[in-house]
């Protein structure tokens, strides 16, 4: 069974996937949601823990205003409804890494209500994208649990409470997603916007962004099937594999005449399969009730409007602007995918040809970064260095081929492009007499090739190649072509 065109198909029938995603995004803040403990990742276990995080008797939570601001800014970026009044509640369940025995979260009255998140799926063969609107159900604030460690001791599990109490935004979609491609685009869009806002770093490998996927299948046009929830997917690749496996599993059950039971499942990356974790709890199982130690959170309209006025230019607006400046839709989608990439490109393209700059960033720089496993923040080549390479090519001082070689030199050794060109004699040969002398010499040695070119002018490329070989790629290609045409055609 393969996933194609928003459906899972097999030999007998067609099925449609119905997906709803709950994305848990760790709020970027120096301290936790209800305590002053550090949120620094990578510290020694149980060093970022206050008396509140450890749930010592008599310790009372105090709301972190920065986390509230970030949640509101996120809601505004998603063009969602900001609720002027929201309420924290206790969600009662026991986990060894949740010392309180309950989680402080929001349920009936979240800080952010409904909205729409447009995603772009594609590109197709013409390089065009299809826009799909995914409904946002709500965003609520809640505290994270700690972390259980099972592989240090053979007969016991250890607990690290550094993460306990860190602020999370749970971003809940409606069940509007109909394919793995849409699910991937949705999560990438969320992560991109969160990074533009500075509300979450989006580093899934560090656990600061995780996804729960609610998955069901149905015949197209029928009512929704029974959903199963896949918990704690910490990469887009694992999310994609989990959705595909779970959809296949449910289809197999239904086609054999069985019934899909609502449950919570885990994804095993080693086996690329989901397995049952527990039966799915309902809201009444958690015994929600208002948190008695926190008053309802009330926001003034003026507070919300101040935050709205400080929003940065977001990916969709930036994409439209880049396209209006002459960048292709596909290239613009890559450039705006990460704020750091967009910033690099904008600095590079100032007063330069946007298409040439986009090509260098996408094909050369990002390609090299991906190969080296680096982020653009750690790029060995700066905007100024790459800009200097482009200027040297555009001004005819070096050829594009030499520019590629120069890129490699600076990537590995650093340095100023102009200085390297001078010290290594990489500048183009533009002396007409020198180029003519080389052409004449090649013509004398290859008289048979002259006749071939005059019969088939396209074969002039052979002579161009010979000249470039003699000059080690330094001859000005435009000048070489013009002189050869004068002499041979």
Image (cartoon, rainbow, N blue to C red):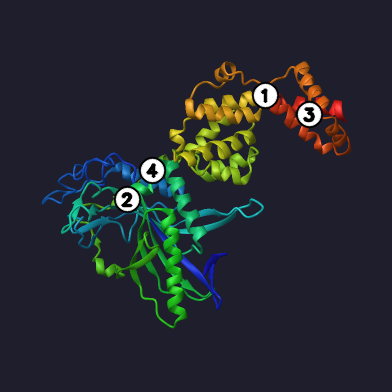
Identify residue for label 1: 474
Camera-side residue of 104 and 196: 196
Distance of label 1 from label 2 (alpha carbons)? 57 Å
Image marks 4 and 3: residues in contact by CB distance under 8 Å: no
Distance of label 1 from label 3 (alpha carbons)? 14 Å
Q: Which mark is residue 405?
A: none
Distance of label 4 from label 3 (alpha carbons)? 51 Å
x 79%, y 26%: residue: 442
Q: Earlier in the sequence, mark 3 or mark 2?
A: 2
Residue 72 in sight in this render: yes
Residue at the farthest left position? 57
Identify residue for label 4: 201
Disc number lying in front (4 or 3): 3
Image marks 3 and 2: residues in contact by CB distance under 8 Å: no
In terms of secondary structure, where does tag 4 sit? loop
- Left/right placement of residue 138 relative to residue 161 reads right
x 83%, y 33%: residue: 449
């Amino acid at each position: 069974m393969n996933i194609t065109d928003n459906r899972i198909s097999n030999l007998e029938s067609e099925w449609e996937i119905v997906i709803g995603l709950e994305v848990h995004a760790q709020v970027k803040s120096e301290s936790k949601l209800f305590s002053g403990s550090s949120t620094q990742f990578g510290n020694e276990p149980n060093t970022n823990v206050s008396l509140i995080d450890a749930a010592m008797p008599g310790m009372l939570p105090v709301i972190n205003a920065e986390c509230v601001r970030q949640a509101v800014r996120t809601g505004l970026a998603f063009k969602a409804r900001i609720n002027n009044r929201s309420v924290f509640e206790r969600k009662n369940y026991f986990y060894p890494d949740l010392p309180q025995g309950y989680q402080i979260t929001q349920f009936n009255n979240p800080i952010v209500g409904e909205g729409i998140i447009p995603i772009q799926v594609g590109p197709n063969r013409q390089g065009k994208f299809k826009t799909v609107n995914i409904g946002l159900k709500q965003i609520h604030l809640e505290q994270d649990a700690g972390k259980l460690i099972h592989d240090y001791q053979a007969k016991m599990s250890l607990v690290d409470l550094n993460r306990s109490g860190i602020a999370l935004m749970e971003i809940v979609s409606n069940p509007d997603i109909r394919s793995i491609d849409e699910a991937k685009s949705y999560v990438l869009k969320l992560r991109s916007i969160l990074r533009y806002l500075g509300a979450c770093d989006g580093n899934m490998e560090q656990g600061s962004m995780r996804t729960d996927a609610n998955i069901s299948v149905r015949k197209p046009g029928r009512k929704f099937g029974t959903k199963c929830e896949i918990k704690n997917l910490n990469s887009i690749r694992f999310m994609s594999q989990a959705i595909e496996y779970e959809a296949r599993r449910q289809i197999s059950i239904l086609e054999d005449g069985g019934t899909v039971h609502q449950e919570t499942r885990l994804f095993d990356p080693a086996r690329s399969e989901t397995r049952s974790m527990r039966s799915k709890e309902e809201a009444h199982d958690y015994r929600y009730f208002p948190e008695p130690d926190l008053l309802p959170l009330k926001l003034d309209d003026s507070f919300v409007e101040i935050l709205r006025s400080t929003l940065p230019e977001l990916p969709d607006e930036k994409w439209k602007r880049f396209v209006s400046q002459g960048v292709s839709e596909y290239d613009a989608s890559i450039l705006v995918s990460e704020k750091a990439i967009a910033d690099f490109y904008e600095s590079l393209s100032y007063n330069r040809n946007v298409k040439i700059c986009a090509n260098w960033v996408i094909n050369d720089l990002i390609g090299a970064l991906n190969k080296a496993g680096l982020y653009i923040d750690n790029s060995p080549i700066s905007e100024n260095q790459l800009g200097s390479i482009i200027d040297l090519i555009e001004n005819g001082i070096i050829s594009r081929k030499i520019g590629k070689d120069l890129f490699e030199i600076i990537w590995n050794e650093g340095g100023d492009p102009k200085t390297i060109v001078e010290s290594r004699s990489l500048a183009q040969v533009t002396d007409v007499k020198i180029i003519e002398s080389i052409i004449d010499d090649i013509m004398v040695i290859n008289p048979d090739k002259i006749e071939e070119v005059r019969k088939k002018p396209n074969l002039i490329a052979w002579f161009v190649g010979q000249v470039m070989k003699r000059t080690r790629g330094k001859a000005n290609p435009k000048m070489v072509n013009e002189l050869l045409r004068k002499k041979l055609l």
